[in-house]
Structure formats: structure tokens, C-alpha cells
Image (cartoon, grey):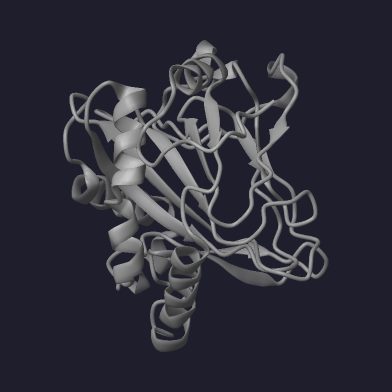
Amino acid sequence: MTTDAPAPPGVLTAEQVAFYRAEGYVVLRNVFEPAEIAALAADADRVLRERADAVHPDNLRVRFKPHRATGEPVFEVLDPIADLSPVARRMTRDPRILDALHDLYGEPAELFKEKLIYKPPGATGATLHQDWIAWPGFPETFLTVLVALDPFTADSGATEVFPRCHLNGYLSAKDGQHHYVELGDLPAEPVPLLLDPGDVAVFACFTPHRSAPNTSALSRRGYFISYNARSDGGQQYDKHYREFHAWLRAKAPVEKRSALFFR
């Protein structure tokens, strides 16, 4: 079940806020106009055309997934992208997002991180996981705003959330590592976030989620913008990426660390 009624820009109803708190996610329809989504999609594609150096396996901002059929690496993510795309940067500050999050938090939201997931045809999905990670100071108010650039369908590998499971908190060892969640640990059935371009979904950091491979002929681009409540650590965007890059370097084989860069 999703709340499909359009919300006035930046203003959530009491029912939508209650749904989010109870279920761990909420869907908002038609938040962005087609022209706005087209502008972001075009700028995301421009970055790929003009910044070939950014899409390099040793760049800490990119990630690859194996092709579902061949196993060959497929470029999938720019994390972050706002420093390369003025359109993306404006969206992170859009009042329609920030005001909606104020309604969920009861206070202002602060940008924590953002990434553009391109998920081209053939890309594998995301294994079941929670977004929170046990790093010192990692905000428990962390949530993600998903803006659909392309249709999120069953064939394209729409994100699936497990409602109400966020109420159980973090389900893995608090050892500072990223963990996957075992399906058998979850009492709820998954809900696919079936989105049209311009729709927005918001889900909490403790909400388990996953996605299937993209078996369609089109990319499934989504802008995943994450925030924390201002009282939960304030502005942490730069701090997060310093820690994230240090974590990625530490996980890389020793012989490859000197080749890693960020640009």
C-alpha cells in the first residue's frame, strides 16, 4: 500500500506523516514537473559525456555492477554527483523536498549524501540491506529521498522496501562494516516502489530494501538524496564523504590504494 494522492509541494498531510512513521516509507506523486526531470536527466547524461575521467574504476565516486547475463562490469553510480551537476545540486535544496522533510522531522533537514544511480539495462540489483552503518556519529535520523528520473517498474528493477521493519532498528552487528540482511529475519512482505518520473519516495535508514536486476531495455535512473535532522549532528555532508572515502580506501587491496583518487 502506498499513499498515492499528490501532496501540495512541501506540505505533507497528517496521514502521510503517520504512514511514514508507521511503515518506514512514503510515496509522493508528481512532486517534480516533467521538464524538471528532463533537465536533471540531461545533465546527468552530460556529466557522463564530458567527464570521462569521472567514470574511471579507480575514482572513489563511481561504482560498477556485474551485468546480469555476462558478469562484465557495468557502470552504475556517481556518488556524489551534485558537485558535477548544477541541476542535481539545486534539487538537493529544493523546498518541495526540504519542506516535506521538515514535516517528517519536525525540524529542518540537512543534506548528508547524494548519488545518481543509472542502473542501465542488464545491471544487477541491490542485495537486501539497511542504509544505516555503525560509524561514530552516524545519524539515526538518516533517510533517503528517491527522485525517479525513469519509470521504476518490476522489469527495470524498482526498489523494494520492507514496511514496518524499521521499528526493529539496526539488524546487523554494529562493527562499522556494511552488512546485508537475511530475508528470513524480516516478518513483512516487500513493497515495490513503482514510480513514474517526477514521483518521490522517502524511506528511513532502518527500512530494509533491495532491488532486482534491470531486465528492461531502458535505464532506471534515480536520484537518491539522503538527509539527517539538523539536531542529529547538523551539517555533515563534507564529513561524511571524508569518512566514506577513508573507509573505501581501507577496504581496497593494499596494492591498489595508491591508485585511488576522487575527482
Nearer to us in this view, 208 or 251: 208
Q: Position of residue 44 (x, y in %)?
A: 45, 72
Q: Quadrant of residue 115?
A: bottom left
Is residue 154 shown left or right of residue 54? right
Query: On screen, 45 above or below 170?
Result: below
Nearer to us in this view, 1 or 253: 1
Q: From where the camera sits, is residue 24 visible? A: yes
Nearer to us in this view, 188 or 33: 33
- Residue found 35% across the figure and 38% down from its top: 10
- Residue found 78% across the figure and 49% down from its top: 154
- Residue found 34% across the figure and 68% down from its top: 87
Looking at the rendered image, the quarter that the C terminus falls into is: bottom left
Q: Position of residue 207 (x, y in %)?
A: 54, 26
Q: Position of residue 20 (x, y in %)?
A: 50, 22
- Residue found 75% across the figure and 66% down from its top: 122
Query: On screen, 172 above or below 191?
Result: above
Q: How many badges with numbers are in the image? A: 0
Is residue 59 shown left or right of residue 218? left
Q: Position of residue 37 (x, y in %)?
A: 49, 64
Q: Quadrant of residue 129?
A: top right
Nearer to us in this view, 126 or 229: 229
Q: From where the camera sits, is residue 261 visible? A: no
Q: Quadrant of residue 1?
A: top right
